[in-house]
Amino acid sequence: MGEEQRKPLLKRHYYENCPGCKVDQEKEVAQGVPFRHLFNIWIIVLSTALPISSLFPFLYFMVRDFHIAKREEDIGSYAGYVGSAFMLGRALTSLLWGIVADRYGRKPVMVIGVIVVIIFNTLFGLSVNFWMAIATRFLLGSLNGSLGPMKAYATEVVREEYQAIGLSTVSASWGIGLIIGPALGGYLAQPAEKYPHIFPKGSIWDKFPYFLPSLCISVLACGVLIACIWLPETLHNHKDTDESPDDSYEALENATSAIDEDKKPQESEGRHLITNENLLLNWPLMSSIIIYCVFSLHDIAYQEVFSLWAVSPRRLGGMSFSTDDVGNVLAISGFSLLIFQLTLYPIVERAFGPVNTARISGVLAIPLLQSYPFIAMLSGFTLYLVINIASVLKSLMSVTITTGLFILQNRAVEQHQRGAANGISMTGMSLFKAIGPAGGGAVFSWSQKRLDAAFLPGKILK
């Protein structure tokens, strides 16, 4: 009898004009990995992630060119404020965008997010002073709420057996964007100085030396916006209470006796589900969000401090890298991350599960990060080799943790709550990430001041 009760009592009813029902019908007959949907997810998340960290390699020089910092040691603090503006804006609006996605659909929120990237990321590259940079980054974060609904969309547009792959695509694209973004910023910033035969002195590229990386990302976003025309909507536009047509009444009557036999167990389970309607009381969801927020604080602080540390002079404890050098390190990390997600991660996740893989990665990251001050003491080829290995390992651990947490969050709620649940997740994460760049930049500036005061002229590293 148990097997019979697992079978649906009624054939599912699909509504003709419901986009969510249309997607569900396509999923029933679809076979194999849905590469088209995964590619759509990948490019949309990539266009959202690239602007977040693309500024880090040149942010030090951008703030310096604004002439707002009175001393070189203060540049890190001002750079932290610019980095935090984006996350502060997103923290204030992520929950609102999640609610909008649950009410009006995932697709409108994603399309608006791509449009916002095109407009405000371009304006950031044209910033002429510190406050314009702060304002454009804040608006870019507050008006782009696509990442939270995108995680919900990744679980809805594919069959259940491919949901882990969908969320892995989100985290992989996100991680690659956060790595390739700084690589683009490092390669394309100040083009008139690096590539004078292509971008001559006195041109717009010389007047706005940080415009080219922003423009390239915005052009990519334009292509993504065009692709969004064919993006299917997954949200159902009808109420669940309307799903039982009149001709199914008799079938429901005949099924009553089977349901009554298991009434007590179902009532206890029902109370649990009703309790979880309040997302703040859904402990599986909230526990994964708390861990995600704490890790996000660490991750964004690392991303900004790494770039600031890499380009800082050796006398202040840095590595005296150029923006090209930073771009090379991050590009290698991004390529390694792509290979890892496509080949090794599915095997590791199946063997250990998302929770254990996240735990192992978190533990291994501690000694790795503790080794960075000692890496800065190296020089030449040894320095480049070791810092590349460390950066690759750190990136792989980060994306492993993020993917595991994405899976846990979206499995903890039903479809009609996923937008709001991911909105809560993005709000908390953005708030913590807003603290990260400001706090990381302040601590970095403080450490530079201490180092600058501690070194005697005869001991300064050349």
Image (cartoon, rainbow, N blue to C red):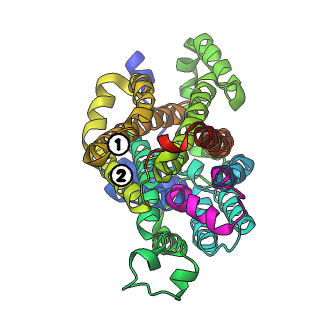
Q: Is residue 416 visible?
A: no
Quadrant in which the N terminus appears: top left
Circle nearer the N terminus (2, 1): 2
Crowding around mark 2 (Cα neighbors within 10 Å: few <14, some 14 to 19, many 20+) is many
Could you tell me how many numbered marks the image carries? 2
In the foreground, 57 or 394 = 57
Q: Please, which residue is most extreme toward the front here?
A: 458
Amino acid beneath label 1: Ile
Q: Which residue is mark 1?
A: 387
Residue drawn at (37%, 25%) of the image: 353
Give the image location of residue 71, x and y in percent.
Answer: 68, 55
In the foreground, 259 or 106 = 106
In the image, which disc is placed on residue 329?
A: 2
Amino acid beneath label 2: Val
What span is in magenta?
A: 52-74
Crowding around mark 1 (Cα neighbors within 10 Å: few <14, some 14 to 19, many 20+) is some
Describe the element under mark 2 as helix, strand or loop: helix
